């Protein structure tokens, strides 16, 4: 049996299990809605103009968070990876602070950036900074010294060494770091939107939950998961196109 067939069987089994639970009567009404209700929820969602405006808000916040956190993590990781003294002094801090739930910083973000999009962007940027910085630092240390010697023999300057030799050589950890950063950035932005916001996909999810509109809530969750999976798959394909091995 091919891999595609195995995946289809697993998906069909999961859907059948969900439908069985929905029809079993074991749960309160619509806690586990039937597949038909979820499909109706998806159709209604795509026909609602507010969905697209809220999607644009979350997408803009996420893009800005990735830009800020990604660039900062890239330069910090490169500095730590290329300087043993900096790595010994500070990289352990990143390793300790990285797994800390960033949502506990949300009150601080509100005080610093207000209740608008700024605090959500800050949450996403802080969330994605750590995995990107740690991955880039490991990637810099993994660059073969031979590559650097070749660059120096060709009299490459610092910028040329970075863009032409080091950056391509650490493509795999760089892509994997950004994939991890993207995942936690989504979590940070959506969690922040569920806590204090009147716009965004996170707000729509918690609003549907508060109204006990479970079909719409599940429809929003499906759209969010599918969007994240699509972007992740595109990143993997792009990395493989450039010869980077990803996990």
Image: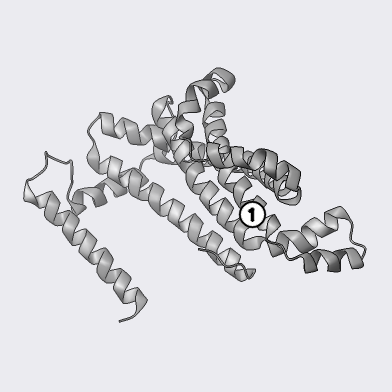
**Residue 155: % across, % down:** 93, 63
Q: Quadrant of the N terminus?
A: bottom left
Q: Is residue 188 above or below residue 161?
A: above
Image x and y of residue 60, in percent:
55, 39
Total numbered circles: 1
- The reply to whether residue 64 is in sight is no
Residue 88 placement (x, y as % from top left): 68, 43
Residue 241 image-quadrant placement:
bottom right
Front residue of this view, candidates 136 and 203: 136
Residue placed furthest toward the top: 111
Query: Can see residue 157?
Result: yes
Q: Residues within 10 Å of mark 1 (few under 14, many from 20)?
A: many
Q: Is residue 24 left or right of residue 166?
A: left
Rendered view: 144 above or below 69: below
Q: Residue furthest bottom?
A: 1
Q: Secondary structure at mark 1?
A: helix
Display coloring? one colour
Say whether residue 169 is left or right of residue 187: right
Where is residue 115? Give x, y as percent: 50, 21
Q: Which residue lies under the disc numbered 1?
A: 138
Between residue 135 and residue 127, name the one nearer to us.
Answer: 135
The one of 121 and 51 positioned closer to us in this rendering: 121
């Amino acid at each position: 049996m091919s891999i595609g067939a195995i995946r289809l069987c697993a998906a069909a089994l999961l859907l059948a299990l969900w439908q069985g639970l929905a029809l079993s009567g074991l749960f309160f009404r619509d806690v586990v809605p039937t597949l038909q209700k979820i499909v109706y929820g998806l159709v209604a969602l795509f026909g609602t103009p507010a969905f697209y405006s809220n999607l644009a808000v979350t997408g803009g916040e996420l893009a800005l968070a990735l830009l800020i956190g990604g660039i900062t993590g890239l330069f910090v990781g490169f500095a730590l990876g290329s300087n043993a003294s900096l790595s010994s002094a500070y990289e352990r801090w990143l390793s300790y602070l990285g797994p800390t739930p960033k949502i506990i910083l949300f009150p601080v973000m509100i005080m610093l950036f207000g209740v608008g999009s700024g605090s959500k962007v800050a949450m996403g940027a802080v969330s994605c900074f750590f995995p990107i910085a740690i991955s880039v630092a490991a990637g810099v240390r993994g660059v073969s010294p031979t590559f650097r010697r070749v660059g120096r023999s060709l009299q490459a300057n610092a910028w040329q060494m970075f863009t032409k030799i080091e950056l391509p050589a650490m493509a795999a950890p760089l892509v994997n770091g950004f994939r991890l950063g993207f995942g936690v950035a989504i979590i940070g932005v959506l969690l922040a939107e569920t806590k204090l916001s009147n716009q965004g996909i996170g707000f729509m999810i918690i609003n549907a939950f508060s109204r006990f509109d479970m079909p719409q809530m599940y429809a929003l969750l499906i759209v969010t998961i599918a969007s994240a999976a699509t972007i992740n798959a595109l990143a993997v394909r792009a990395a493989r196109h450039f010869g980077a091995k990803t996990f």
